[in-house]
Image (spheres, rainbow, N blue to C red):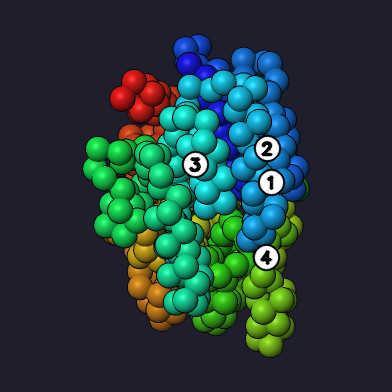
Amino acid sequence: MKVLHLGSIKTGIDTYVRNTVSAASDKFEFVIVHGGDDNGNPFYRNGRLVPEHKIAMYRSLNPFKDFKAVMQAIKVIRKEKPDLIHCHSAKGGVVGRFAAFFTHTKAVYTPHAFSFLSSKSRIKSTIFLFLEKIARLKSNLLACSNTELELGLSKVGFKKEKAFVWNNAISDPLSENSSEVAPLEGPYIISVGRPSYQKNPLLMVEIMKEVHKVHPEMKFYMLGVGFYSPELENMENLIAEYELEDVIKLLPYMSHEETLQHVKNSEIYLTTSLYEGLPIAVLEAMAESKPIVASDVIGNKDCVKDGYNGYLLPLDCKQFVEKINFLLDNKSEREKMANNSRIYFESDFLLKNRIADLEDIYMKVVNA
């Protein structure tokens, strides 16, 4: 079976596609179609390059470029003749599903967090939801978490028989060979993501300001600053206002290996997101045996069990500070939750144990 992945292949989506392509059985072959500004590393499968095609697909809405992207995708589909198109993210979902519709090709769509969650504006959210409904066409939903599945059924209007869930899964970073990287100044709390509306970075600053009062030795690092970071200036200004430049560090995008090493050496993983699909970065922190202090929102609640491998909290600074300080003050509790994170990762999110489930979904959709 030939599967064509189509989307903006960046950050967590890049990890999702790269891991599943390399882990799938020999019954499958793959093609990658991605946006014009995606500059990731080539994809390999069994030591061979996976065919890739670039199309004029960009994050911002542009009717001319979006129409052009659909036409380019149609051309690639007719050339490659895939059995199934797996669309990723909002823009990839629209472009890919329209291209699939016009070429009579089966399609599944993984939002990785629905687009209507991404805007502060109620009007924009309503428009994005409308677009999600229009783009359903004949496609199937392949949610990356149970909460994403529930949203797809209740708000977007997917029918149960055309909706599936395959929780995000990753390969075990402990099995990967890793070279030494320069350590960060510590001890520290860490988060991986971009300063954007979704990640709610200003709350992180407020939290660390208060944690620093009790634990002045503790640093905070946010990794992955760079691509699409609209809240970066606001975050930097707030850090400067509180005179926390030596405490809170915003580091640019680095290799996946470096990122994992820095996560491994941290005390706690922190996320204050307003919403998620099912966060790859949190799964990687769990794999590295980190306790997770997380916002109680869509996606996070699919991988963090409150009181077991971390805490799920309302978006309230005081409660985050209390739980972080509690973990920093209680090594035994911190180590217990760290151990539970690893156990939970191995049981539910280890790719080699779950790739067959994804393959089964692909087969069901194609044979339906």
Instruction: Check contact, mark 2 vs mark 3: CB within 8 A.
Output: no
Q: Secondary structure at mark 2?
A: helix
Q: Secondary structure at mark 3?
A: helix
Judge by depth and name the residue closer to the eye, 179 or 273. Answer: 273
> Gap in Å between the C-alphas at discs 4 and 3?
28 Å
Q: Position of residue 51 (x, y in %)?
A: 68, 23
Q: Find disc 4 in the rendering and name its residue.
A: 229
**Which numbered disc, 4 or 1, marks the residue closer to the eye?**
1
Q: Is residue 179 above or below residue 80?
A: below
- Position of 42 with respect to 328 (left or right) is right
Residue 68 is labelled as 1
Whichever of callouts 2 and 3 sits on the residue coming sooner in the sequence is 2
- Residue type of the residue flagged with mark 1: Lys
Q: Residue at x 61, y 71 (%)?
A: 217
Residue 213 at least partly seen: yes
> Gap in Å between the C-alphas at discs 1 and 3?
14 Å
Judge by depth and name the residue closer to the eye, 97 or 212. Answer: 97
Q: Position of residue 90 (x, y in %)?
A: 52, 52
Q: Is residue 290 above or below residue 232?
A: above
| Outermost residue, front side | 102
Residue 97 is labelled as 3
Judge by depth and name the residue closer to the eye, 102 or 364. Answer: 102
- Within-10-Å neighbours for mark 2: few <14, some 14–19, many 20+: some
Q: Residue at x 65, y 29 (%)?
A: 76
Whichever of callouts 4 and 1 sits on the residue coming sooner in the sequence is 1
| Outermost residue, left side | 160
**Which numbered disc, 4 or 3, marks the residue closer to the eye?**
3
- Residue type of the residue flagged with mark 2: Gln
Instruction: Check contact, mark 1 vs mark 3: CB within 8 A.
Output: no
Residue 174 at least partly seen: no
Q: Position of residue 290 (x, y in %)?
A: 46, 50
Q: Is residue 161 above or below residue 203?
A: above
